[in-house]
Amino acid sequence: MARQDAVRCVRLFLCALNVLFWLMSACILGVAAWIRDSLNAVLTLTAHTRLEEAAVLTFAPVVHPVLVVVCCFLLMVAMLGVCGTLRCDLVMLSWYFGSLLVILCVELASALWTYEQPHVQRSDMISLKFRMSNFGLRQHQWLTHTWNTFQTEFECCGVIYFTDWLEMTEREWPPDSCCSYQYPGCARRAHQHDLSDLHQEGCGPKLLSFIRSSALLQLLRFLGVAMGVAQILAMALTLMLLWTLHYGRKWPKEQQCLPAPPGGGPPAEHHLHMEPVS
């Protein structure tokens, strides 16, 4: 009776862990998609610079298709684990354990890659200024859109300061995306009357901060560590359940193979002969 209760607890706990895998995988996919939007803007602005190499080195394992494949695969593996646990199927549970082991190895490799610190310096931001000269050109509309999106999202202007736009382009005032409250002509009005209406911080420091210590990247790392711990626990419980089911099925067969004593009594190896005490 105690053994059956223990097996029931292991099965319930294993099912709960698989439901947790579904939730964590969905969260990781959502955060990775959110990071991808900002990363695309960063890679566009930093093309052919050391900052682009640093961004790829830091975020490639996070938004790489391998991560998406692993999370989608984990969703199917969790379903396999639930079915194997409910049915007490040794083959399905064995496949479940092996799949979790492969996924854990891939996650460890990705974690080691993302924790490698990129070698970038503040002087690398100067190279971004040379990409500002193409702003507003018809053949570089994608770059213009990226600058406006990045300055609006990160609340910055220029590379070091908003005067970079006046220095590197023929513009007399920054783009309207530099305004705290955007409307057509807001940058011209702010430049002529009140500079406080413009974002005072450059996009270079914001970009370096995004590459080195993005909050979303830290969130993904936390989710990855939590999922890894849950996977190790699920693997341990799966081994325990496999061992219990295997020997639970083997024991009755061994009982049937034991020779029975004459008279239909219990098996010979389990019959205790008590000598009378004189």
Image (cartoon, rainbow, N blue to C red):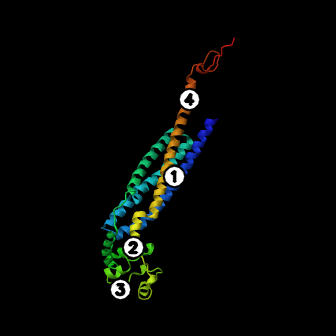
Q: What amino acid is at disc 2?
A: Cys
Q: Within 10 angstroms of label 1, few (less than 14), some, or many (20 or more) residues? A: many
Q: CA distance from mark 3 to mark 2?
A: 19 Å
* Contact, mark 4 vs mark 1 (Cβ under 8 Å): no
Q: Within 10 angstroms of label 3, few (less than 14), some, or many (20 or more) residues? A: few
Specify the label residue 251 is tagged with: 4
Which quadrant does the N terminus fall into? top right
Q: What amino acid is at disc 4?
A: Trp
Q: Earlier in the sequence, mark 4 or mark 3?
A: 3
* SS for callout 1: helix
Specify the label residue 172 is tagged with: 3
Q: Residue furthest right?
A: 278
| Image coords of residue 247 (percent x, y) | 54, 32
Q: Is residue 152 above or below residue 222?
A: below
Q: Earlier in the sequence, mark 3 or mark 2?
A: 3
51 lies left or right of 263: left
| Image coords of residue 161 (percent x, y) | 38, 78
Q: Which residue is drawn at the image coordinates 61% and 37% (left, top)?
A: 4
